[in-house]
Structures are given as C-alpha cells and as structure tokens.
Amino acid sequence: MIKANDPKLKSWVPVPKGSDFPIQNLPFGIFKTPGLTPRMCTAIGDHIADLQVLSEHGFFDDLDVPREVFAQPTINNFMALGKIKTRAVRNRISEVLDDDLEDWDASQLADYFLHPQQEVEMLLPVEVGDYTDFYSSREHATNVGTMFRGKDNALMPNWLHLPVGYHGRASSIIVSGTPVRRPMGQQIPNDAEQPVFGPSKLLDFELEMGFVVGKSTKLGSRVDVAQAEEYIFGMMLFNDWSARDIQKWEYVPLGPFLGKSFASTISPWIVTLDALEPFRTAGPKQNPEPLPYLQIEGANTFDIHISMAIQPENGEEKTVCTSNFKYLYWSMAQQLAHHTVNGCNLRVGDIMASGTISGQEESSYGSMLELTWRGTKPIAMPDGSERKFIHDGDTVTMRGYCEQDGLRIGFGKAAGKVLPAQP
Amino acid sequence: MIKANDPKLKSWVPVPKGSDFPIQNLPFGIFKTPGLTPRMCTAIGDHIADLQVLSEHGFFDDLDVPREVFAQPTINNFMALGKIKTRAVRNRISEVLDDDLEDWDASQLADYFLHPQQEVEMLLPVEVGDYTDFYSSREHATNVGTMFRGKDNALMPNWLHLPVGYHGRASSIIVSGTPVRRPMGQQIPNDAEQPVFGPSKLLDFELEMGFVVGKSTKLGSRVDVAQAEEYIFGMMLFNDWSARDIQKWEYVPLGPFLGKSFASTISPWIVTLDALEPFRTAGPKQNPEPLPYLQIEGANTFDIHISMAIQPENGEEKTVCTSNFKYLYWSMAQQLAHHTVNGCNLRVGDIMASGTISGQEESSYGSMLELTWRGTKPIAMPDGSERKFIHDGDTVTMRGYCEQDGLRIGFGKAAGKVLPAQP
C-alpha cells in the first residue's frame, strides 16, 4: 500500500465529516491570494496547504526535489519530476499533516502554510499542451446515435473496436468558478436551407472526467497499454460545455469545433492515481475482443461517483444526473495506448477527457441532450421553472468522489455560471 | 509602402538569382549551431543573420525592444511585442543589410552574425499553442466529397456558409528536415467486418499553408473580420501528412484523429504578412453571400505559388503538383473571424492551416488521394517506379514563393523523409 493511503491516518488539521479532502487524498492544485504569487498547494479538509512555504522550510529537501518547483504557476514541472518523486512528496505531505507527529511539529507552522479554502483563489492547475476528448461511454454514444440515426444504426461500425476520440481546444479550458458566456454562432433552423446567426439556444453540459499526462514521449514511439498508467499523473472533473445547435450544423464531416471550443470547465484539484488506488475496479466486459494493442487484464478503472447540478439564478440547486466513471467502456489505459499507437507524442500537461459518461438508467445520462431527450422531456426545477437546456444565469456544478468503508476521496467541484451572449 | 518592402533595396550580402530570401523578405526563424544556443535569425540569400548578435551590439536598442527577446528558442515573445515593434525590427534589419549603408557599416560585423544556411540547424520556430486545420479549398472538398459521396452530394450543406475546420494535434508539428515515421493503426480492409492492425498503406501529403497568431484575445471576445489580419503575424508552408486508411476507419462521427496526428511538417521560416503585401490579391467570388460576420471587401488573400515534390530514395525528385494559395474559397481573415465568433480565445503561437489547396486543373490537386484519384491513376516517377501514395524512403518536399516584376519572396521548403513503420 502507498504510505499516504493508509486509512488509519488522521490529520491534526480538522477534516469535517463528508469532506472531499481527508489526509488520504492530498490532491495538487495552484492558488494565489492578494498577497501571494501563484504556487502549488494541496487540500486538507476546508483548508489548503501552501507547498511553497513547506518547501522553503526545507520539508522536501531530502527528496531531491528542487524547491522552486513548488513556486510555479502550474503543476507541470512538478509532474515532470516523475512518479517516484511526486509520490515521495505526497508521502511527505502526509507526514507533515499527520497527527502522529514524530521529528517535527508542523502544526506550529500552521499559520504560515494553511489557509481557509474560501480565502484563496484557485487557478487553472495545468498548462495544457494538447487536449483530446474521447467518446468512451457506450450508453452515451448509443443514446446520441439513436437520436440522430435511429436505434439500429446507433453505434458506428468502428465504435466497439477503438476508443473514438478527437482533438479539442486547449486554450479555452478554464478552472471552476470562471463564468461561461453563451456562445454566438451559425445554426440551421428546422427545415430551413439557410443558416442564421445568433446566440446558441441549446447550451448543454457534458459530464466527463479528464486525466493529465505526467510523462512525455518521443514522436514516433508508442505507449504499451500495460504501461499506460505510468503516464497518467492524476484525474480531474471535466464539464465539456456544448452548444448543440452550433455543433449540429458545423460538425460534418470533420467533427465538433465551435460548438465546443468556447469553454471546458475543470476542477482546480488534480487527484493523483495513487490516491484513487483503493477504488480501482473492473470496467465493462469488452465484446468483441479488442485488437492486441488494446488488450489489458484486470481492474483498469475506478469507482468514482459523479453528478451534475443546475442552480437557477436566485434559485435552489437541483442535481439533474448522477453517474459513475466505471461505466466507461474504454479505460484510460486503452485511450492512451490508442492515442500513441500511430507515434503521436505526449507532453506533460496534455489533458484527455473521457467523453460524456452516461449509465443505463435515465437518471445517469450525462447531458441535457440525453436527459431531456432532445428537449422532449423537460426537467422540472425546484423554483417551478423547467429546463430543456441551460438558461442564462444558471450555475452548472459537477461534483465527484470515491467512497467506501468510511473513506471518501473527492474532487471538489467544477462549476460555471452562464452569462448571456454578447450579440 | 512598408520601408523594408522597397523593391529598389539591395543587400551587401550576395543574394543569388532565384533566391527565396532577398532583402525584401526578411522572414523570422530559430537556429542553433554546435556552439550557439537556439536564437532568432532572419534569412538573406544563402545566409542567415543572427539577430541575437545584432541585438547584443545594440542595433535594436532605440526600438524599445528587450534584447533578450532575440535569445529565445521560439519567436513567440517577439511576435507578442505587436506589429508596430516587429515591423520596426524588420525595417531595422533591412537597414543593417542594405548596401546603401549610412550611420554604420554592419558588413564589418558580418563574421559575427552571418552564417551560411547549410552550416546551421533550423528549429521549430514557434511554440504552438493550439493548432486548427481548415478545409477551405472548394476544389479539394469537392474532389474528396465526389470520391466518397458522389458528385451530386460532394459539398456538405454547411460548406459554402462557413469555413469548416477542426482541431488538430499541436505536439506533432515538426520542422522541415525531421523524418516522418509511417504510422501504425487500425484499418478496415475492403468488404471486411473486422479491422486489422498494421502500417498505413495509404500515406499521403496535404499541400497547405499555415499562419501563426501574433496577438492574443480574451475568452469570450470576438475578432472582427475587418481587423483579423492584425492578429496574423505571418505564414509558413504546411504539409499535413495523412494516413488515408487509418483516417477512413476512425473519422466517423468526430473527425480525423490518428490519421493525422503522427506528424505535420512546417517550413522553418515565418514570412511576415508585411513581406507578402505586394502580392495581395482577391480570392474567388463567394456565392451565396456569407453571413455578415464573415463579409469582407477587397483583396484578402495572397498570390503564392506552392508545389509538392517526391524524391525516391537514391532517385530523382519529381514535382507532382503545383497550386496557389489564392485558390482558397475562404480567406485567413474569415477563418480567424469564424474561429473566434463563439468567444474562443487565441494565444500567441496558435497555428491555423488552410486545408489542402487544390485548384481546378488536375495538376493542381494538393494530395495523392486526388492526384491519383484514390490510387486509380498512379503517377510515373523518373526512376520508372510509380506512386499511388507515398513509399518508405521517399522525401516529400513542399515549396512556396510569390513572384512578380522580378521580386521573389519565398518560404524555403518543408521537407520530410518517410521512414518505415516500427511494427
């Protein structure tokens, strides 16, 4: 067992019941305050711990980790140290926060390195290289395929043979809390022959998880599916905002473009694969058997509960769907092996998202498109209004966590408020 | 007229007849030598001029340009200075290389800052943010559409209303001279129901031009089509290598992915829009009239001759197609206005490519797919072999230049040798 994962550990920092951030989590992020430059931190209960300060006090000096890596505005250089060193740092943070203090009493330094989460601003934790979005939920692909091509042709012929994916826009990946402006764009009204220009009327979320690459590869080389997790530093919540009307008109034949590139919201916390280890589980059985380069035995996914909620302006929040990462047909290892099978190179900071994660139950569908079945079954909101798609003023919040035997490892949230379009 | 564009200028550095790099060009690139760290340079005749050395000698000190911008391994920070300053630098380089020397005699410093091009290694000039590939040649879209859907449905309904584009892979953009390994991947044999895995058999080039963004925008803002060229620093040659068999199997419904992401080759030189100004011309008439946000009057494209050649290993090179950038239906300004109309933000270093540039003549088709009409009309090579697609050992070289009234502004070349797949 990874030392920092020991369920018996307790922190001297208070961790409220139900917190996403017990001492067994220790995710990584970037924060700033009016007085402090952007730097690395971890989360513990309702606090963040400033890793630059810990580093400056020498807590990591014996780990052969340069102090300045914690003073960067992204975690990229930290991830690039490799899993041996980043695991050692996580274990050391665990020792510093452990209430069973030995050589030091870090709690005496608490005023220097702990801040209430509500008093800091969390920033985008990763400088994103390339962003790839997969389409790995069989239920989602089947739902969308059924709507657009009928039940018998729902899945494309390639879908069960490879993890379908496409390149997305990296520049517009934003951190939780950043408002999202409703996009303008071309749409084609039903039965019209000419497109019109205006605000998207069919603004949607997509309930996804992403992972970040922590190890680069050379152009021309491939990552073996059995080694693929070595290249994955950690995971995050991912809301792939989508404008369905823009997407529908533009996407043939080269795929989604402006219907997606206006914003994708991620959580500020990157939860390491190490912290997720206790929640490892098997994914769905794959039939037909994939080609050999995609074959992998064992438990290759994680049991992560995810949900999306909508809060109207001045209204009460309603959770509109709950799903689970483990429903995905294609695992992260398979996605990564496929992505590099042609020799495409990876860079530290690349983000790959899962695609919308829908389950079999209607309540687990991961987008408004599916939940309201193209707007034909509106969702009733607590304030008496209804939603076919997202309204201006709505705050859309994704949450995610693992939980078993009293241990909860959470991701925090990925939230964004929708602002009206600027005509 | 921009001062450095004066056709009467002559350099004290010899410029051979037919050179791409007279004193009126002055493109920007990055070079290194065994003794010199990567740094900015320009091209003059068969030489490059080291801009870091010129900067250290104070030649740009009065232009309010920090000296260290020339000592960077990419031109991103230079581009980010803005067109007023980068234009002033280009004008100053022109004065330094002008044979009508006034205040100084830079030729006395020639040994310090001039190197024969063949003695330096040119590097990727740009740190690429996001890379977008458009599909803006009507002839190319019609050719491909005719092959796959028949003549009557060749163009998709959206094609004449918007510049169709998709996100590409930035990490695998490489500089001319870098070998390209034939990709492995899934393909579906004709009439088969199961895919097979192996080396691509249908490796192709795509004759494209790219431009690089020199000015960033904020998420949520749009670039007006009339101002769009202010955001374009310069242009480059762009070979969008394509594996047609991988692409065909994978691309529904989300677009090209591994069929493209193994490599895209660009020229080492970024030719400024300023240098291209004398070759400004009008593009094709657009009918139907585009929506207002895409409407722009006047001469919005450039007359740039482009070609692709194939040289078998130990064989003679053959130019297999010649085309022209001005054939494109959608202009760069329209592409950029469209790209940002949904609020998608631009970053300095973003590259946008045109899509394959085909003309009306068969000899101007910009890919082997079109030139050999899916392999049905092979091309005879000087060594007696024939080509349906690209063979291992072939070197594929793109060239491009503008020329009129004795003035030639060229792009050099974008070349890559194909290495066999690694099974």
Image (cartoon, coloured by chain):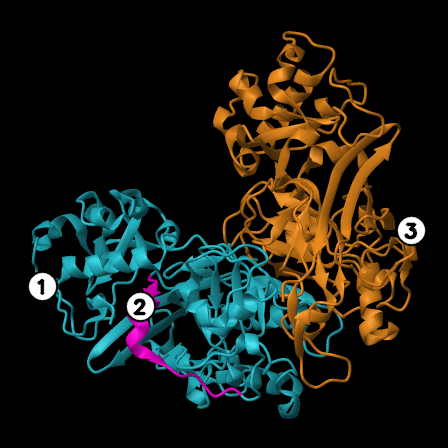
Chain colours: A orange, B cyan
- For the residue pair A327 and A306, the one nearer the viewer reads as A306
Are dots 2 and 3 on a single chain? Answer: no
**Tag 2 near tag 3, CB within 8 Å:** no
Q: Which amino acid does label 3 sit on?
A: Pro
Which image quarter is the N terminus of chain A in? top right
Q: Is residue A87 left or right of residue B80?
A: right
- For the residue pair A130 and A197, the one nearer the viewer reads as A197
Q: Nearer the viewer, mark 1 or mark 3?
A: 3
Q: In what element is the residue under mark 2?
A: helix
Residue A283 shows in this picture: no
Residue at the image position 69 percent from the left and 18 percent from the top? A97
Identify the subunit bearing mark 3: A
Q: In what element is the residue under mark 1?
A: loop
Identify the subunit bearing mark 2: B
The residues bearing labels 2 and 1 have C-alpha atoms spaced at a distance of 21 Å
Identify the subunit bearing mark 1: B
Question: Which residue, given by chain and number where applicable, does mark 3 sit on?
Answer: A382
Residue A423 shows in this picture: yes
Q: In this view, does B150 lie to the left or right of A216?
A: right
Question: Which residue, given by chain and number where applicable, does mark 2 sit on?
Answer: B274
Question: Which residue, given by chain and number where applicable, does mark 1 sit on?
Answer: B99
The residues bearing labels 2 and 3 have C-alpha atoms spaced at a distance of 59 Å
- In the rendering, at what x and y percent does residue A240 appear? 70, 55
- For the residue pair B301 and B14, the one nearer the viewer reads as B301
Residue closest to the far front: A314
